[in-house]
Image (cartoon, helix red, strand yellow):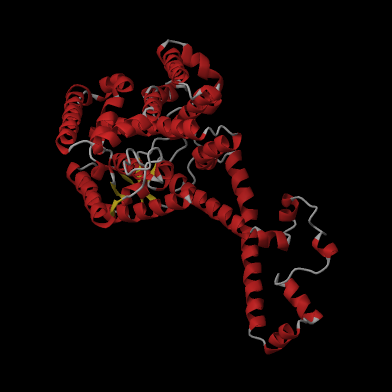
Amino acid sequence: MTIVGPITPGQVSFFLGIFPVISAWIYAEYLEFKKNSLASKARHSDVNLVEIGNGAVKEDDRAVLLEGGGLQSASPRARSSTSSFSPIFKFLMMDETFLAENRLTLRAISEFGVLLAYYYICDRTDVFASSTKNYNRDLFLFLYFLLIIVSAITSFTRHHDKSPFSGKSILYLNRHQTEEWKGWMQVLFLMYHYFAATEIYNAIRIFIAAYVWMTGFGNFSYYYVRKDFSLARFAQMMWRLNFLVFFCCVVLNNSYTLYYICPMHTLFTLMVYGALGILSKYNEHGSVIALKIIACFLVVILVWEVPGVFELLWSPFTFFLGYTDPAKPNLSRLHEWHFRSGLDRYVWIIGMIYAYYHPTVERWMEKLEETEVKRRVSIKMAVAIMALTVGFFWFEYIYKLDKITYNKYHPYTSWIPITVYLCLRNITQSFRSYSLTLFAWLGKITLETYISQIHIWLRSGIPDGQPKLLLSLIPDYPMLNFMLTTSIYIAVSTWCHL
């Protein structure tokens, strides 16, 4: 087995640390098996049944059961003999009681370590072969529409959730809808990478903008409604966003910005948290929210629009956010971070605005549903026609631009297709109450599928390299290989999400 790239101290530390955990887990499983085996024998023993009936247990049998972990010692001194030691010391001493109590935790850590080792083997060794990407529009569209058809046949679901604001079945921008939205976008995003479908580059930019929009919308909704600015909640969110990517950076020797979605969402989550957390007791006043949103726009304009400010602000964090693409070694270390974060620098604020007006729009839609049929249909048709018209002009004059020119307009126009989609997706109450739960399920594992794709579905082969190759488990059979690698990839991503 040939290893590509240097062995780093972080990789050595990780693998040296995971082996004792796996050993402890195996031993804990052995103790569990031994305990269950002895308990099974005790249940089927006539002597044991008599003793249980009489309420007495022989000392010899007690000793045997104690060795297997079947009973706890009756002696307080025995119970407390190791209770004063730290968990790390108990782990190092292979304390049987401690291992038995933490068996499931040890199993989870061991499985996670094995998965990261699988990431490393797939992407940094020659154990498995590689193949090149090949784009065929017919095959691309066939696979995507086939998935839509299968999803519609097997997972078309109507939801009966009630609005948390009015208690009625309005379901405007409900959770099922947003999860489905993330799911079908993520499938196209992943297929774009797998098949190198460069002709839909502009669409992918919109999808990423929609994810960032959801970051602003979702976080604003939570903090504004729940008013929970606790450190525990914030730490939980940061852990969710960065736990997997941190270990991937260590084990694969990659830069944080290679997984640019993670630092982007982390940054914009921080900005929403800061915007609402500062002087949070005044958030009930609309004028204060307006001032905070204006302040967010001003901060973004200052950092990203004024030359030199971005470099001045972020240069101290180059060690953390710096990235050098091996294929483009002459670019600035902060170029990638500047480019990625700058593309969607405004859309998270648009998400905050939409979240603030979400209850108002929902009340308006509630009144609309109660009006007479003719008026209701007329208003909905007018909204649909207006949305389609705006979408058409955006498509003709913005979306069709070449990649480089489009990127210049994207930060200022990405909210347009998002708004058009929201209008059309929620145009009728029945339409917004349906969802394809297969896509909704995929929408729940977008973070894991995004990170994992680089290593166990695609391949870069070198540290910080872009994944320009495909992992090939079945060489010379591209479709069979696609089926197998995708199955493993989705299974691993699902496990990481759990």
**Between 273 and 449, the one nearer to me in the picture:** 273
Report whether residue 326 is seen: no
The total of numbered circles placed on residues is 0
Residue at horizontal 59 percent and vertical 38 percent from the top: 232
Decide if residue 213 is on the left or right side of residue 249.
left
**Between 427 and 257, the one nearer to me in the picture:** 427
**Between 465 and 94, the one nearer to me in the picture:** 94
Report whether residue 406 is seen: yes
Q: Is residue 285 above or below residue 52?
A: above
- The image quarter containing residue 95 is bottom right
- The image quarter containing residue 367 is top left
**Which residue is the extreme one toward the right?**
77
Residue at horizontal 51 percent and vertical 50 percent from the top: 117
Q: Is residue 65 above or below residue 465?
A: below
- The image quarter containing residue 281 is top right
Q: Is residue 291 above or below residue 110?
A: above
* Residue 88, horizontal then vertical, whole percent: 72, 50
Decide if residue 489 is on the left or right side of residue 238.
left
* Residue 461, horizontal then vertical, whole percent: 42, 41
**Which residue is the extreme one toward the top?**
307
* Residue 69, horizontal then vertical, whole percent: 71, 69
**Between 15 and 199, the one nearer to me in the picture:** 199
* Residue 359, horizontal then vertical, whole percent: 37, 32
